[in-house]
Image: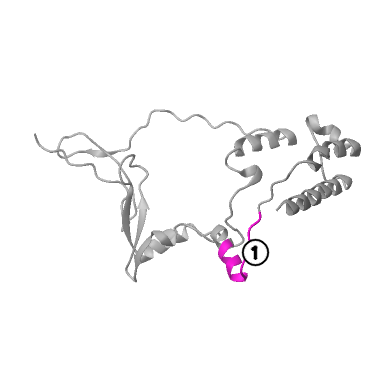
Amino acid sequence: MRVLSRLFRRLFIKGLLALHHTGHLVFFGDHAGLAETAAFKAWLTPFRKSEWVVYAKPPFGGPETVLAYLSRYTHRVAISNSRLISADAQTVAFRWKDYRIKTGDRRSVMRLATDEFIRRFLNHVLPDGFHRIRHYGLLASAARKTNIAKIRDVLGAAQPEAAPQASAEVVALTLREPCPCCGGPMRIVEIFRRGAIPQSRAPPLEQAA
């Protein structure tokens, strides 16, 4: 592993010098002086002595394992096979988690008509020419906002205007007709398509004292 680490270190530094020589590296701000060849070589000197950490995995067993590895990042959409319970021409059953439940077991089983399941699944399929892949580097979620703001500042691009703060007060939608039992307003909990299964759970009935 140490041999591989030093080989990668040499090739990486050699590549940086080649990019600098051809003018493909551009420096800004406090690092503008690195545009000079001597200053850039001096800046690279400590990296020639640093022990680089190289992560290497065993080679793939063949083209089938390569495709299996890449497919987890490029073609996995919507739902994993482990969540599927049963499927036939009429119904598909699968496990799902209700994140609105804060305590207790949030997992339950949902059963959908096969055509409805296919319709929902296809909503996650990307159009032709697009590939689903994980974000990395500058777009990594841990520092994405900070990096994008810094990139805009370096390029001299205007920062986007901050979105207006939403009001803290939530106004519930109600029906025009009052409740036939108590006469109070009837609040809309959820709107769903005909034939679809509602996601909201009905509140428990109050027990008479």
Evaluate whether residue 83 shows in this view.
yes
Q: Per the image, is 20 magenta?
A: no
| Label 1: which secondary element | loop
Q: Give me the residue at 70% from left, 37% from top.
A: 151
Q: Is residue 158 left or right of residue 184?
A: right
Q: Range of the magenta residues?
A: 56-69
| Percent x, y of residue 66 | 61, 66
The question of residue 59 being in magenta is answered with yes
Q: Position of residue 34 (x, y in %)?
A: 85, 35
* Left-right relation of 71 to 184: right
Residue 157, compared with residue 13, is above or below; it is above
Judge by depth and name the residue closer to the eye, 203 or 97.
97
Q: Amino acid at mark 1?
A: Pro
Question: Counting other residues with Cα less than 10 Å from the Cα at mark 1, is it few (<14), some (14-19), or many (20 or more)?
Answer: few
Occupied quadrant, residue 120: bottom left
Give the answer, above or below, for where 104 lies relative to 94. Answer: above
The quadrant of the picture occupied by the C terminus is top left
Tell me: residue 193, above or below residue 187. Answer: below
Q: Toward the viewer: 110 or 45?
A: 45
Give the x, y percent position of residue 98.
Answer: 35, 47
Q: How many marks?
A: 1
Residue 99 pos. (x, y %) = 37, 44
Residue 156 can be seen, yes or no: no
